[in-house]
Amino acid sequence: MSGFLAVVRRDLRLALRQGSDSMMVVTFFVLTVVLFPFGIGPEPGILERVAAGVLWVTALLASMLSLDRLFQTDYEDGSLDLITRSPQPLSVLVLGKVAAHWLTTGLPLLAAAPLLAVLLNMNADGFGVLVVAFALGTPTLSLIGAVGAALVLGARRGGVLLSLLVLPLYIPVLVFGVSAVDAAIMDLPFKAQLLILGGFLLGAAALCPWATAAALRQAVE
Amino acid sequence: MHRFANPNRFLKLANAILPWAAGLTVILTLAGLYYALVASPEDYQQGATVRIMYVHVPAAWMALFVYTAIAVASAVALIWKHPVSDLFAKASAPVGAAFTFIALVTGALWGKPMWGTWWVWDARLTSMLILFFLYLGHMALMNAFDDPQRGYKAAAVLALVGVVNVPIIKFSVDWWNTLHQPASVARMDGPAIDPAMLTPLFLMAFAFKAYYITVALLRMRGEIAEAKVRAISMSQVHG
C-alpha cells in the first residue's frame, strides 16, 4: 500500500509541476467535440441524437492521447528499471501509475463531459448517468491503455501502434457507455449497462495491472 | 514438447510433415471444390450464390481457430520460453489475418445479392472486423522492435490480452447490435443444412486447415533460416 501511494504521489507531483499534460487532454477533448457541430450541422435534433456517442468516442481518443507518456518518460530516464526491481509487487505499483494517470486525465474529462453535453444539446435526463458512466468507464480505459503503453515501450512509431492495439479493446466500454446514456435519455432502464461497466472496471483492475507488469518486465529486460 | 524446442530437431519434423500436408491440401481442395461447385445442389432460395458459403464459412472458422492457436502458442512461449512457439505465433498471424480478410470479403460479396448491400453492421460481421484489427495490431507489434525477441514477447502478451477480450467484444457487439438494429436483415439461418451441402463444407474446412499447417510450417522454416542467416552475419561482424 505504501508503494502504491508513493507512486501516486510522485506521478501527481510530476504532473502538477509539468502541468501541461492534463490541460492538453481536456483541450483536445473540448476542441474535438466542438468540431462535430461544424461537421454534421448545428440542428439541435441531430446533435441531441449523437451527443452520447460523440462524447464517448472523443473521450476514448483523448484518454488514448496521453497514454504513450504513461511509461515513456520513466523508461527513458531509467526510473522504470528501479520500479521493476523494487521489492514491492510490480502490479501494485502499476496500479498506482494508472491511478495517477486517471486522476490527471480521466477526472478532467469527467468534469468537462456535462458541460460539453450542454453544448451538444443533450437532454438533461442524461447528465447524471453520463457522469456515472464516465466515472466507471474512464478508469477502465486507463487500465486497458496501460497494457498497450507498456507493450509499445521502445517500439518504432509507438504512438500510432498504440492506437492500433488499444482502440479495438476499448469497444466494449464504448458500447455500454453510450447505451447507458442513451437509455437514460429515452427514459428506459439503464442500471444493467452501468453494472456491466462496473464489472468491466473490476475485471480490468484485476487483470490489467498483471498484464502490464508482465509487459514492463520484458521491456526492461 | 520440449524435444522440439531445438530448431534443428523441429526442422526435421517439419520437413517430414510438409509434403503430406501440402498433398492433403491439394487433394482436399480439389475434392472440396468439385463438390462445392459441381456436385452440390443449389439453395432453393439463394440459388448458386450459396456456393460462396463453402469458402466463407471455413475461412471464418479458421480465423477464430488461428487466433486461438496463436494464443495457446503465446502462453507456451511465455511460460516455458519455448522458441519454436514464438516462431509459430509469428508465422500464423498473417495467415489468420488473411483468413479473416477472406471471410470479410466473401461475406460482402455474399451480402450484396442476398441482403442488397455490401456491408451491414451485423453482430457477426462487426466482430469479425474487430478480430481483423486485433490481427493487424498483433502483426504490427511483432515487427515494431529492432530486437526480434522483444517483438515475440510483446506480441505474446498482446495475444493473451486479446484472447480474454474476444468473448467480451463479441458479447458487447451482440448487445449493441440488438439495441441498434432490430432484426431487419434477412438471417442466414433458415432451414437446417442439407447433407449434400455439408460434404463440401467439411471438405473445404479440412482443406483450409491443411493449407494452414502447410503455410505455417513453410513460414516457420523461413523464420528459422532467417535467424541462422542473422546469427552468421552477426558472428562475421563481431569476427
Image (spheres, coloured by chain):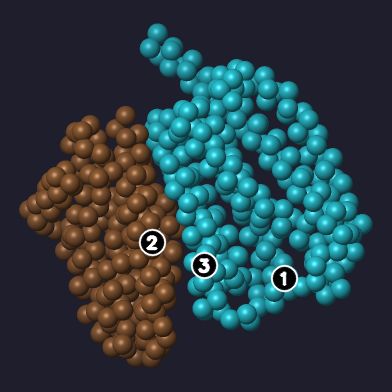
Chain colours: A brown, B cyan
x 85%, y 69%: residue: B43
Secondary structure beneath dot 1 equals loop
x 65%, y 31%: residue: B217
Res. A29 mark: none
Q: Position of residue A66 (x, y in %)?
A: 26, 56
In 3D space, how far apart are the residues under numbered discs 2 and 3 (Cα atoms)?
A: 15 Å
Residue under pointer 3: B173
Res. A200 mark: 2
Q: Position of residue A145 (x, y in %)?
A: 33, 53
In 3D space, how far apart are the residues under numbered discs 1 and 2 (Cα atoms)?
A: 32 Å
Left or right: B88 as drawn, with respect to A105: right
Secondary structure beneath dot 2 equals helix
Secondary structure beneath dot 3 equals helix
In 3D space, how far apart are the residues under numbered discs 3 and 1 (Cα atoms)?
A: 18 Å
Residue B237 sits in quarter? top left
The total number of labels drawn is 3
Quarter of the figure with the C terminus of chain B: top left
x 44%, y 45%: residue: B158
Q: Which kind of residue does numbered mark 3 sit on? A: Val
Q: Position of residue B140 (x, y in %)?
A: 46, 44
Q: Chain of mark 2?
A: A
Please determine if labels 2 and 3 lie on a single subunit.
no
Of residue A108 and residue B114, the one placed in the foreground of this image is A108
Residue under pointer 1: B188
Residue lying furthest front in this view? Answer: A1
x 65%, y 75%: residue: B117
Residue lying furthest top in this view? Answer: B239
Q: Chain of mark 1?
A: B
User: In this rendering, is residue B225 above or below A96?
Assistant: above
Labels 1, 2: front one: 2
